[in-house]
Image: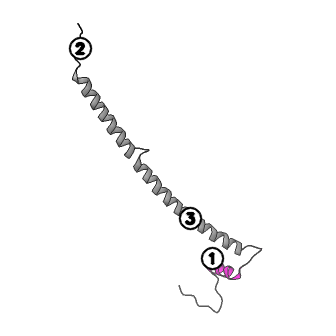
Amino acid sequence: MTYTRKRSPYGLIAYVILTFVLGTYFSFASVQGDFGLMRRVEIDAEAKRLESELSALREQTATYRNKTKRLSDTYLDLDLLDEQARDVLGYVRSDEIVLR
């Protein structure tokens, strides 16, 4: 005589619910979590913004290097020197009229 034990349906229900809850949690975490898809999109957008800012700063640095070279002892650009003296020091030639 074989004895078979009837299983309780509560274990199967608990298993299904636990599997559903864990699947929902991991799906949500993969999209909205710290390492999810949405965070990846934010990081990519920030990287593009920072790359454009870096490009602008490199252009500005190149401009400053050019002006510094043009005002150095070995290479003096008189037009730039005149422009800087007028702008920074407020120099004006005697034959010019200044409007403020």
Q: Nearer the viewer, residue 79 or 2?
A: 2
Q: Residue 88 location, x and y as percent? A: 63, 76
Name the residue rendered at 33%, 37% in the picture. 23
For residue 88, which numbered disc appears in the image? Answer: 1
Tell me where residue 94 sits by quadrant: bottom right
For residue 5, which numbered disc appears in the image? Answer: 2
Of circles 1 and 2, which is in front? 2
- Give whichever of discs 3 and 1 has the lower sequence position: 3
Magenta-span inclusion, residue 58:
no
For residue 18, which numbered disc appears in the image? Answer: none
- Give whichever of discs 1 and 2 has the lower sequence position: 2
Q: CA distance from mark 1 to mark 2?
A: 97 Å
Circles 1, 2 touching at the beta carbon (< 8 Å): no
Instruction: Tell me the amino acid under the disc marked 2.
Output: Arg
Q: Residue 60 location, x and y as percent? A: 59, 68
Magenta-span inclusion, residue 89:
yes
Instruction: Tell me the amino acid under the disc marked 1.
Output: Val
Tell me where residue 5 sits by quadrant: top left
Q: CA distance from mark 3 to mark 1?
A: 28 Å
**Residue interval drawn in magenta:** 73-97
